[in-house]
Image (cartoon, grey):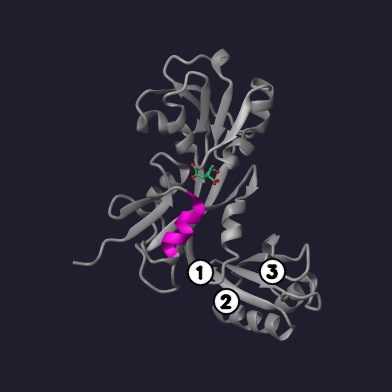
């Protein structure tokens, strides 16, 4: 019998990462909870699991910083796919806790960021506390009479003893988070997508100009790349000798069938210009 696929996600059960993983892989795989996003990356790199599902970007609050920080690592793995999940945040409390009792609101920093207007209008003097995940926040308020958690409605089912005080509290009604599906290597079969998509349609490249101050600027790297970049992120390059020296993440979208070889040629052009390009995923 074929080995069952193992999938790591930011836990505990009830996180949006868990929902995204389930949307992609369903019930025919074994799920492994990690306590941090970095922990999901570690499980994939150590090959403790076959794949990890990692939040990458939210339509209200933007890039997931912990994910881009991990993508700076040399052997970070390979992005094999994506899942887009609609996010509707709720405010949950232990049963019986009233709005006026709330002194602390906990959640993942992304969820706190997506609900800034709601929090400023409704709870201007409440202390906001970062939690490892939305479901970890839900779990933490189970035994509290003065705290609330921002998380999904599902947490009221996962954790018995919680109730929903407010629903749909994010700053815009339309709210989506995109997740990456990451595996240690480019190969290895994954189950088919629930809804088939023509692939590959996207790729992610990591661009850098070396550790000193003589390398090409990002504009020169993009000229050498000579491909349409649909998204660009940057994070500090920690091993650089120069301060405020960044590493860039360029996402490209497919234009035609010759795409994979075009990417290889573009990587070669960037290297020939004195910079470095590393393929982080194609999906
Ligand atoms: O805390 C969770 O539930 C997560 O899965 C993490 C995460 C994120 O990091 O963006 C995922 C989706 C939402 O945007 C809020 C939080």
Q: Position of residue 149 (x, y in %)?
A: 51, 29
Q: Which residue is mark 1?
A: 200
Give me the residue at 57% from left, 76% from top. 259
Q: Is residue 43 magenta?
A: yes
What residue would you read off at disc 3?
Answer: 228
Q: Taking 76 as reference, is 117 left or right? A: right
Image point 66% across, 66% down: which residue? 250
Quarter the N terminus occupies: bottom left
Residue 282 x, y percent position in the rendering: 52, 69
Residue segment shown in magenta: 36-44
261 vs 21: above or below: below
* Type of secondary structure dominating the magenta stretch: helix
Residue 163 lies in quadrant:
top left
Q: Establish if 19 lies above or below 219.
A: above
Q: Relative to the observer, which residue lies in front, 59 or 210?
A: 210
Can you tell which quarter of the image residue 112 is in? top right
Residue 247 image offset from top left, x and y in percent: 69, 66
Q: Which mark is first along the chain, 3 or 1?
A: 1
């Amino acid at each position: 019998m074929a080995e069952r696929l193992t999938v790591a996600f930011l836990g505990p059960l009830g996180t949006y990462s868990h929902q995204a993983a389930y949307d992609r892989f369903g019930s025919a795989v074994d799920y492994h909870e990690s306590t941090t996003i970095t922990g999901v990356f570690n499980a994939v790199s150590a090959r403790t699991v076959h794949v990890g599902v990692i939040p990458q970007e939210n339509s209200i609050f933007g890039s997931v910083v912990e994910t881009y920080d991990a993508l700076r690592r040399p052997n970070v793995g390979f992005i094999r796919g994506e899942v887009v999940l609609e996010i509707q945040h709720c405010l949950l409390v232990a049963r019986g806790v009233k709005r006026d009792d709330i002194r602390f609101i906990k959640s993942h920093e992304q969820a706190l960021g997506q609900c800034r207007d709601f929090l400023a209008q409704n709870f201007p003097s409440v202390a906001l506390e970062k939690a490892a995940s939305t479901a970890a926040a839900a779990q933490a308020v189970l035994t509290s009479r003065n705290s609330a958690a921002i998380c999904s409605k599902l947490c009221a089912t996962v954790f018995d003893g919680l109730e929903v005080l407010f629903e749909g509290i994010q700053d815009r009604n339309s709210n989506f988070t995109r997740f990456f599906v990451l595996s240690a290597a480019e190969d290895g079969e994954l189950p088919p997508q629930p809804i088939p998509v023509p692939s590959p349609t996207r790729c992610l490249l990591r661009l850098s100009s070396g550790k000193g101050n003589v390398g090409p600027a990002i504009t020169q790297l993009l000229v050498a790349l000579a491909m349409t970049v649909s998204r660009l992120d940057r994070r500090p390059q920690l091993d650089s000798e120069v301060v405020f020296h960044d590493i860039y993440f360029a996402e490209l979208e497919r234009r035609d069938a010759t795409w994979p070889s075009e990417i290889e040629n573009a990587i070669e052009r960037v290297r020939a210009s004195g910079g470095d390009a590393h393929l982080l995923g194609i999906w």
